[in-house]
Amino acid sequence: MQTSFTPAALSDPDTAESASIIRKCVHCGFCTATCPTYVTLGNELDSPRGRIYLVKDMLENGRPADERTVKHIDRCLSCLACMTTCPSGVNYMHLVDHARAHIERTYKRPLIDRVIREMLARVLPYPQRFRWSLKLARLARPFADALGGVAPLKPLAAMLKLAPAAVPPASANDRPGLRTAEGVVRKRVALLRGCAQSVLDPGINEATVRLLTRLGVEIVLPEGEGCCGALTHHMGREEEALDFARRNVDVWAREVERSKLDAIVITASGCGTVIKDYGHMLRLDPAYAEKAALVSSLAKDVTEFLSTFDLPLPENPVEAIVAYHSACSMQHGQKITQAPKTLLAQAGFTVRDVPEGHLCCGSAGTYNILQPEISAKLRDRKVGNIERVKPDLIATGNIGCMTQIGSGTSIPILHTVELLDWAFGGEPPAKLAGRSFPRMARPVAAE
């Protein structure tokens, strides 16, 4: 794509990078076929190609964002399916991240929108605040339908409807410390505790600790680690996101200096995509560029890490059909596609792919709150495709997807690592209480 950025504009490193990304686009339109918003809405400006035109016009002319540009950029899920499809290597992720930061700096949103976004940024990344907000949401839930009838308040209605009926108690994994390996120590890792996931479903990290320590992995939960920054990063609040990133880089770099880390294990794929991008996000910060690149190189999704092990025979193989939903941040962001399915098959489950698996479920961080109508259409399409394969269980690797899909189906949805922990010697996941599954004969090791 031809551009005409001025030398003054290109003196800004972020604008120069965006100009380079835009020039790679050849207008081929392959991205439109896999873009969830274009498939759903049919508007060219709600496709990656259309948004690239809008961003080009905005950045090239050095002008503030306008209402039309904001509307269509806000509708982008950042699912990154376009990057998987693009034959020209357009890094849409970095382009739309820059566009969102520019919007945040130059566009004044309506008051209610500003208030809701401020609330999300001040609550979701902080576990204690989030826990209390969910308890308050239960009291306010009867007003959800009334709020949903007022257009500017629809995000509040969506928030209330997504809130769980009960908030799990805090987990021991919320406390920093060392979790010792069973038997010979094979590897040493740090485990991201995270923010929203640790409140919504602490059982995910609990299953991770149980499984990894049984496999001989020593786990450190370091003091001072917090939100990865993804939530604020995708809202364009770049300085806040970079502050989160710097804090985590400091914490994990200290652990590397103290005692070698083989990996930083992450159980939420949305977090993993951002942490693997810390090296890019902090590339212009001389105090953090090198440390951030190191952290990004150590970041591993839990299934990516488990794939490096020769796993034993499953102790509790279960006859169950599992529909594997590959989160966008997993398949498009991190390019991890086979490892989770291979591990589930090794554990004895019958794994089925979901039709239209490349399309987003509509969760996308805060998207299901800020864009509830589009999100609901994508959720219903995803749930319909999952139910077509008639699974007993659904597995995925991202808490946002679990919450989103779980709100539209009665089929139990679990994190992949919860099923692996169960199959390789752990107790049945608590969320399957009252459900029974036939047992397979335990395989016998070959002589």
Image: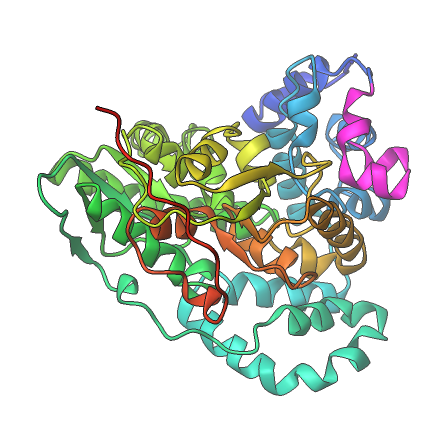
Q: State which quarter of the image contains the C terminus.
A: top left
Q: What percent of the width, then of the height, locates residue 306?
A: 33, 35
Residue positioned 46% across, 46% down in the render: 416
Q: What percent of the width, then of the height, locates residue 101?
A: 62, 42
Magenta segment, principal secondary structure? Answer: helix
Q: What percent of the width, then of the height, locates residue 377?
A: 80, 53
Q: Is residue 226 visible to us here? A: no
The magenta stretch spans residue 173: no
Residue positioned 32% across, 50% down in the render: 208
Q: Nearest the camera: 115 or 355?
A: 355
Above or below — where is 262 with respect to 206?
Answer: above
Above or below — where is 359 with respect to 362?
Answer: above
Residue positioned 74% across, 69% down in the render: 112
Q: How is the image coloured?
A: rainbow
Above or below — where is 294 with respect to 106?
Answer: above
- Left or right relative to 224: residue 63: right
The magenta stretch spans residue 30: yes
Q: Is residue 221 visible to us here? A: yes
Q: Quadrant of residue 28?
A: top right
Residue positioned 20% across, 47% down in the render: 214
Q: Nearest the camera: 234 or 358?
A: 358
Q: What percent of the width, then of the height, locates residue 179?
A: 17, 53
- Left or right relative to 41: residue 319: left
- Range of the magenta residues? 29-47
Q: Can you name the residue that lies furthest to the left here?
A: 184
